[in-house]
Amino acid sequence: MRNCRLLIVFVCVLSFALAGCKREEPTTWDSSVLVPLAHGRLTLDNIIVDSLLSADESGLWNLRFNRDLADFNLDSIVNVRDTVVNLECNLPISGSFNPGFVVPVDFGEEIHLNVPSVQLKHAVLKSGRLEYTLISSVNGDLICNFEIPGLKKNGQPELFVVSTNLGSSAAPYTTGGSIDLSGYSLDLTGASGTTFNRIATNFNILVDPLAPNPAQVIAGDNVIMQLHFVHPDLTYADGYFGEHHYNLNEQFEVGENFNLPSGVLNLDGAQMHVDVRNAVGIDAQMHFTNLSGVNASGNALMLNHGPLYVPLNISRAVRSGDQVVANTYAYELNASNSNLDAFMEFLPKTLNVAADVVLNPMGNITDGNDFIFTADALEASVSLDVPLRLGMHDLAFADTLEITADALEEVFNGDLVLWAKSDFPCEAKCDLFLIDGSDSRSIVENATLHAASLTSAMGQTAAAESFIHLPIDTDIITRWNANHRLVIRVTLNTLSQTDVVGIYDHFGIDFKLIANGDYQIHIGE
């Protein structure tokens, strides 16, 4: 270190001297000192996504993971299909009628929505479109008022006021338009208020008060309102939704979230919660039939917990206005009631989930008072909490060392020293190599890093230093100068797989790569 400080002072003095002399030609000198060339620090963040890590009050790392096992798309059961209806109003009179005359009509039509196997009473739409076309065979200018009292926005019924020009049975007058259904509420109890899937309508017709001539009406002339509900999508519905059966069979990656390493683990104290939440006004029954993991070798292991595989009856949620109180159920798994520790030590890369679900297994027991807010329905999720007290065998993680000096010249005599300082209370092996895509060159393999010593304070260790001398040659220097990455890989090993150590948030391994020998430094080009 003293030699290094002397070198820095010498370089500074020489730099000022060179500047004072204003020498423009390149200048070189030789050095024989210890100079740090690269550095890095490996921590648990290098093997596990840091968003999954959380330290407890003692600083012990906990691995916490949450994932939806199933988010049932229950809005499909209240899916309203595209519906086209023709509401025809036949005029019962003949004659010539002056502007302003109200044409008597006998109209009691209802719209029947195409909603298979569901008896809807009320709904709120989040999207969709209502297209309308008015067709008139009347030889006159009319104003047609078509009202849908149960289709409301901001409490106001929807009223279509449509003006027509002269038409005939051979060449009827046609006009139309559309409205965006987002935010509309819909009463589907019909004109009587006691049915379902039906929308009441009103229709009245008068001769346009501003018409230049009387309207010539022949009995049997008709005015038709054609409606097309296009992709109506509901955010809320109530009524009776019928009995439905679902077969859940899903698979998702665990490894991509955990970034689980290769090697063998002995975990101590893992806990898992499997939660079922019912936020819809529908009784349900859920029966898990499989919850298993598949590791990187393709082997499968079933997660064993007896209550998980017993059919679960799930009561419907309770609603007061727009406030919903969901019913929740939780399975708690740990080492005493399941094989959870062994399951996690198995290092599953993929989780397979299978379940049978029945909605309204007892039929219409509430007289058509099912309800659903489609954004929050029936779901199952898993949460995992693993205190990182580990027994490890070849638990591997790696990182790239950061360059801290200019690129080395090819004129080099000596060796490199890798200095390491470890807080982990277990032995480690170290590999150092240069890599660029598929091109790699090993510098050192399987070098030993000493284990830190445990102290009397919980979670505290006395760090251990290691010095590894690395043979060096011009090929390595050339590769490094050619923008190869200098990568260090470490594997951790406890004395035995049953020897468990805690991994704390301040644990890491610091590295410095130091040049030890003669090399040439250039100033200028």
Image (cartoon, rainbow, N blue to C red):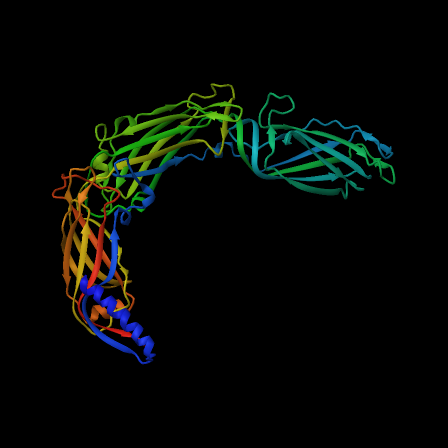
Return the residue found at the far left. Answer: 495
Task: Report whether 287 appears left or right of 123.
Answer: left
Task: Compare residues 342 and 139 and report the one nearer the observer.
Answer: 342
Judge from the rendering whether residue 152 lies leftward or rightward of residue 372; answer left or right: right
Task: Please determine whether, in this image, residue 83 is positioned above or below residue 256.
Answer: above
| Residue at the image point whose x is 46% and y is 27% from the top | 280
* Rendered location of residue 275, percent (x, y): 35, 30
Q: Position of residue 470 (x, y in %)?
A: 15, 63
In the image, residue 305 above or below residue 417: above
Instruction: Report x, y in % for residue 320.
Output: 51, 22
Please report the residue visible at 22 percent of the width from the left and 48 percent of the height from the top: 262
Q: Is residue 269 left or right of residue 380?
A: left
Figure quadrant of residue 173: top right
Residue 224 position in % (x across, y down): 71, 36
Up-down: is 279 above or below 390? above
> Can residue 231 be seen here?
no
Tell me where residue 475 sits by quadrant: bottom left
Residue under the point 20% across and 59% down:
432
Tally of numbered discs: 0
Residue 84 visible within the image: yes
The quadrant the C terminus occupies is bottom left
Quadrant of res 121 = top right
- Quarter containing the N terminus: bottom left
Image-based side of 158 in relation to 498, left or right: right
